[in-house]
Amino acid sequence: MPELSRFYGIIIRMFAEPGERHHVAHFHAYYQEHTAVFSISPVAQIAGSLPQRQQRLVEAWAELHQLELQADWQLLQDGRSPAPITPLQ
């Protein structure tokens, strides 16, 4: 699963399953033993859980980089590699 960004101990990844259609464009966020899945538009947690502070950081980052996330989603669906996205600073 390609890593798109890493900030404050949070790792953001996105992947596509060739031949499988996802219902909604999304990315995965990892923090320590926690994992959550977020939709891209609108930015919303759709599965899993993160501590509240990390969830807010991920949501803020995703709002800032929503267009880049959508572009990376499309790249993966087309069988291409996603581009890295600037971390939250």
Image (cartoon, rainbow, N blue to C red):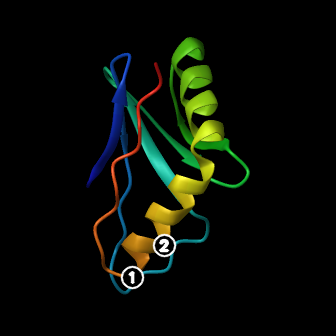
Query: Which residue is under mark 1?
Result: 78
Mark 2 residue type: Gln
10 Å crowding of disc 2: few (<14), some (14-19), many (20+):
some
Q: Residue at x 51, y 64 (%)?
A: 71
Q: Residue 20: x and y, percent?
A: 42, 81
Q: Residue at x 43, y 45 (%)?
A: 28
Mark 1 residue type: Asp
Q: Residue at x 30, y 75 (%)?
A: 80
Query: Element type at marker 2?
Result: helix
**C-alpha separation, residue under disc 1 versus residue under disc 2:** 6 Å
Specify the farthest residue to the bottom: 19
The mark tally for this picture is 2
Instruction: Tell me where residue 55 sits by quadrant.
Output: top right
Specify the farthest residue to the top: 53
User: With respect to residue 14, does 7 lie above or below?
Assistant: above
Query: Going by the image, does 15 lie left or right of 72?
Result: left
Q: The N terminus lies in which quarter of the figure?
A: bottom left
Q: Residue at x 60, y 15 (%)?
A: 52
Which numbered dot is residue 74?
2
